[in-house]
Image (cartoon, rainbow, N blue to C red):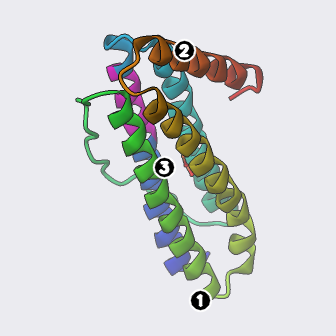
Amino acid sequence: MNKNVEFAINQQINKEEFSSRLYLAMAIWCESNGYPGAANFLYKHAEEERIHMLKLVHYVADRGGQAELLPIDQPEQKYESLLDVFDKILNHEIFITESINSLYEVTMNEREYTTANFLQWYITEQVEEESLFSTILDKIKLVGADKAGMFHIDKELEGMAAAMVVAGI
Ligand code: OFO
């Protein structure tokens, strides 16, 4: 496997692993701050990020490369509110999208078209994730300090977590 591409994928593996840990930290905060639905949704999302990481790990192995586990940063563990949590998630996903785009650029520069093709899945996934999190964030902003509205959003997130279980995520 092309060494520059392998290096860049290993950086992405690290970011996906960090994403999983970040959403786990957020789920823990939600669970102990009265948002059980958001917690379940984020526990599931942490698992999903782990799947994103493993998909890259297996791809590197399949192409005869060597996946490497790099040190992961400690995620923030204290949040001000549910709004703060989802605001940070959206910003993080935008950062991940930029990172996937840079990785795609490396594959293009190295003429690694097979890997570029493989990365299409991540490009599509990022569009879906940014849209999902921005919709949730808009709803949280809309209800503001209204407790009944916030309760309703938490229930909705619980439903989304249950749908992820049904979908086998
Ligand atoms: Fe939430 O994103 Fe991975 O890729």
Q: Position of residue 70 (x, y in %)?
A: 35, 54
Query: In the picture, which quadrant includes the N terminus?
Result: bottom right
Q: Nearer the viewer, mark 2 or mark 1?
A: 2
Query: Are discs 3 and 2 less than 8 Å apart at CB?
Result: no
Q: Position of residue 81 (x, y in %)?
A: 30, 27
Question: For the residues marked 3 and 2, what is the alpha-carbon distance in whole angstroms?
Answer: 30 Å
- The reply to whether residue 148 is visible in this rendering is yes
- Mark 2 residue type: His
- Mark 3 residue type: Glu
**CB of mark 3 near ligand 1 (< 8 Å):** yes
Residue at (53%, 20%) from the top-left corner?
Answer: 153
Q: Position of residue 108 (x, y in %)?
A: 64, 84
Number of marks in picture = 3
Q: Earlier in the sequence, mark 3 or mark 2?
A: 3
Query: Are discs 2 and 1 less than 8 Å apart at CB?
Result: no
Q: Mark 2 highlights which residue?
A: 152
**Magenta span:** 20-29
Q: Which mark is residue 162?
A: none
On the image, which quarter does residue 127 sit in? bottom right
Q: Secondary structure at mark 1?
A: helix
Q: Secondary structure at mark 3?
A: helix
Whether the magenta-drawn stretch holds residue 15 is answered as no
State left or right for residue 146 relative to residue 103: left
Q: Earlier in the sequence, mark 2 or mark 1?
A: 1
Question: For the residues marked 1 and 3, what is the alpha-carbon distance in whole angstroms?
Answer: 23 Å
